[in-house]
Image (tube, rainbow, N blue to C red):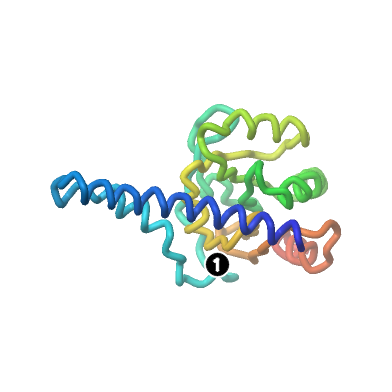
Amino acid sequence: MIHYVMCTLQFVMRTLHVCLVGLRTVWLLGRTGRPARAPTLATLLLASCIPSESPSLRSGDPAPDFTAASLHDGSPVALSDYRGHVLLVNLWATWCHPCREETPYLQSLYERYHDRGLRILGVSVDRSPDHDLVIEFVEEFGVGYDIALDPDAVSRDLFHARGLPTSVVFNRDGTVAFSWVGPIPEGDPTFLEGVEAALGG
């Protein structure tokens, strides 16, 4: 729990950094007397500081329209590509300690349930300059499931993530089976029952 709180604080601090950049941009534009349309960039930066009032994804909700670049070859990866399979989407980052603790268990789940139709898409929200760190992370933990890159953290809003890691399991028809906030405890019966139900028992 302590690690999850620390990870969430890191997530918040990065968001605050973006907010401060936006505020500084507004201040500089005001001093330089730039045209009124110039603050658009700052407006976009500040928009990321406003917490979403939308509820978390609920059972039965349709999958968000989300596409990211594959770590493997840079090709686009969409949730719709996994239609017909049970899909576990896991939002994570290399700087998130609970994510590091959770990853070996995710890999074991992938190996255990792959033949029954489970697919896992790990979505890294690391910044673009940290691309090499993502590769090192995947190699360190022997990750065999798909990894996608989301340096702008678009997934954070689409999946209503309040912190990292956040996981969402989708049914074969693309609807939400259930969401899980925080690291998945190894062997957690509630989580496993949810996966089994999505796979069809």
With respect to residue 16, does 145 lie above or below?
above
Can you say which quadrant of the picture contains the C terminus?
bottom right
Q: What residue sits 43% from the left and 60% below the top?
A: 49
Q: What residue sits 25% from the left and 50% below the top?
A: 40
Q: What's the residue type where badge 1 is placed?
A: Leu
Camera-nearest residue between 57 and 138? 138
Mark yes or no: residue 110 visible: no
With respect to residue 143, does 18 lie above or below?
below
Left or right, 3 with reference to 95? right
Task: Check disc 1: other Cα within 10 Å, few if <14, some if 14-19, many if 20+.
Answer: many
Measured as percent of width and height from the top left, residue 81 is found at 54, 44
With respect to residue 144, does 26 lie above or below?
below
Can you say which quadrant of the picture contains the N terminus?
bottom right
- Report the residue that reaches farthest toward the right: 187
Left or right, 83 with reference to 145? left
Q: Which residue is mark 1?
A: 57
Q: Secondary structure at mark 1?
A: loop
Q: What residue sits 70% from the left and 34% below the top?
A: 138
Residue 195 figure quarter: bottom right
Camera-nearest residue between 157 and 172? 157
Left or right, 141 with reference to 76? right
Q: What residue sits 64% from the left and 51% below the top?
A: 90
Measured as percent of width and height from the top left, residue 186 is found at 84, 56
Measured as percent of width and height from the top left, residue 189 is found at 84, 66
Query: Number of labelled discs?
Result: 1
Camera-nearest residue between 30 and 191? 30
Measured as percent of width and height from the top left, residue 71 is found at 58, 32
Camera-nearest residue between 169 and 15? 15
Mark yes or no: residue 151 visible: yes
